[in-house]
Image (cartoon, rainbow, N blue to C red):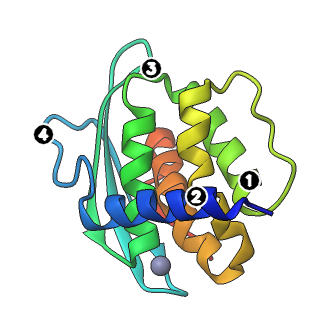
Amino acid sequence: MIDPELRELYQEIILDHGRHPRHFGQLEGANREADGHNPLCGDKIHVYLRVDDEAKIEDVMFDGRGCAISIASASMMTELLRGKTVDGGKRLMNAFLDMVKGDDADFEGVDEDDLDQLQAMSGVSEFPMRVKCATLAWHTFAAAAEGDGDATTE
Ligand code: ZN
């Protein structure tokens, strides 16, 4: 269970990202991108990446429409992914997926500031319907990184 004070802080962080999404819009010079769709809620987002020759994520942006959770999660994700390698981003994704599904997450190699950000979304694990909203952006990032083109939470 999450401490009530932390819960309040986490809710504020999520609301803030939902209302004022960071890195929202089209990324010029993107070299990888993907669409993501969560049919359960109707969230649709598009993730743009600019990845360099060393597989480092130089820039990441997103746009689309969705509920507050899906937008907040995408916004937080863009902050976390900037400057990371694709592999580093996937490690974060796996830790995040485990966390929101309520599984034991492996946070090895995840730095502390990143972990704090991820944990702001951890309350979602209590609302199974919301898990797909929270994970959509990450699945879409993975699809973009792999060049798969599309991601769906179904
Ligand atoms: Zn949603």
Question: Left of 144 or right of it: where is 31?
Answer: left
Amino acid type assigned to the residue bearing label 4 in the image:
Glu
Contact, CB < 8 Å: mark 4 with mark 2? no
Amino acid type assigned to the residue bearing label 3 in the image:
Ala
Q: Which residue is mark 3?
A: 55
Q: Is residue 83 above or below residue 144?
A: above
Q: Which mark is residue 28?
A: 4
Disc 2 packing (10 Å; few <14; some 14–19; many ≥20) = many
Q: Residue at position x 65%, y 27% from top?
A: 110
**Element carrying mark 3:** loop
Q: Earlier in the sequence, mark 3 or mark 1?
A: 3
Question: Left of 111 or right of it: where is 147?
Answer: left
Q: Residue at position x 66%, y 48% from top?
A: 96
Of labels 4 and 2, the one closer to you: 2
Separation of residues labelled 2 and 3 (CA atoms): 27 Å
Separation of residues labelled 3 and 1 (CA atoms): 26 Å
Amino acid type assigned to the residue bearing label 1 in the image:
Met
Of labels 2 and 1, the one closer to you: 2
**Element carrying mark 2:** loop
Q: Which mark is residue 99?
A: 1
Q: Which mark is residue 121?
A: 2
Disc 3 packing (10 Å; few <14; some 14–19; many ≥20) = some
Separation of residues labelled 1 and 4 (CA atoms): 32 Å
Q: Which mark is residue 47?
A: none
